[in-house]
Amino acid sequence: MRRVGVLVATVGGAGYFPVAPGTVGSAVGVGIYLLLPPAWLIPVTVLVTLVGIWASGEAARHFAREDPGPVVVDEVAGQLLTLILTGVGVRGAVLGFLLFRILDIVKPWPANRFERLPGGWGIMADDLMAGVYGNVLMQVAVRIAPSFLL
C-alpha cells in the first residue's frame, strides 16, 4: 500500500518535477478545477483531502521526512479549495493560482502552525488553510471584478 500512497501523494509523479514541484502540483489543481463540472468540485476536493492525508503520511514514512518535497497532493487540495465555489473561468483560475502559491509560500498564521500536526495531517493542513485564505480573497475579487474573472 505504501507504493500506492507515494503515487497518490506525488500526484502520479508530478511531485518529482525537478523545478518547483509545489507549483506543478498547484497547476494540476487548476487543471482539475477547469476540467470538472462544478457539481463535482466539492466531492472531489473532499476526496483529494481525505486520501491525501493518508497518502502524505505513507509518503512521509517512505521518504523518511516530515514533509517530503515530492509530496504535492497538498497543493492540489489547497488549490482546489482556493477555487471552489468561485465560479471563475480561466482568468480567475490564474489569479487563484497566483494567490494560492503566495499564501502557500508565506503561510500566514495559523497555517504555519498547522505544519506541526503529525504525519499526513501536518502535510495537508497548512495548504488547506492557505486554500481557505485564497478562497476568501477570490470571493472578494469576484465581487470586485466579476466580468473579468467569471
Image (cartoon, rainbow, N blue to C red):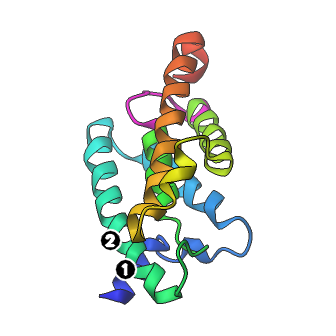
Q: On residue 31, which mark appears?
A: none
Q: Is residue 107 magenta?
A: no
Q: Is residue 31 visible?
A: no
In the picture, the quarter occupied by the N terminus is bottom left
Q: Which residue is mark 1?
A: 5
Q: Amino acid at mark 2?
A: Trp
Look at 48% across and 32% down and name the residue there. Answer: 135
Q: Locate residue 139, reporting x and y percent.
A: 49, 22
Q: On residue 54, which mark appears?
A: 2
Q: Considering only vertical position in the picture, is 129 above or below 47?
A: above
Q: Locate residue 97, reporting x and y percent.
A: 61, 42
Please tell me whether the stretch drawn in magenta is mainly helix, strand or loop. loop
Whether label 1 touches label 2, CB < 8 Å: yes
Q: Is residue 89 magenta?
A: yes
Q: Considering only vertical position in the picture, is 32 above or below 59?
A: above
Q: Amino acid at mark 1?
A: Gly
List the single residue furthest toward the right.
19
Look at 50% across and 74% down and name the residue there. Answer: 10
Range of the magenta residues?
Answer: 83-91
Look at 68% across and 46% down and name the residue there. Answer: 106
Viewer-proximal residue among 118 and 97: 118
Look at 25% across and 47% down and name the residue there. Answer: 43
Q: Quadrant of residue 51?
A: bottom left
Q: SS class of the residue under badge 1?
A: helix
Q: Locate residue 122, reporting x and y percent.
A: 45, 62
Q: Is residue 14 visible?
A: yes
Viewer-proximal residue among 136 and 114: 114
Whether residue 17 sits left or right of residue 44 in the image: it is right
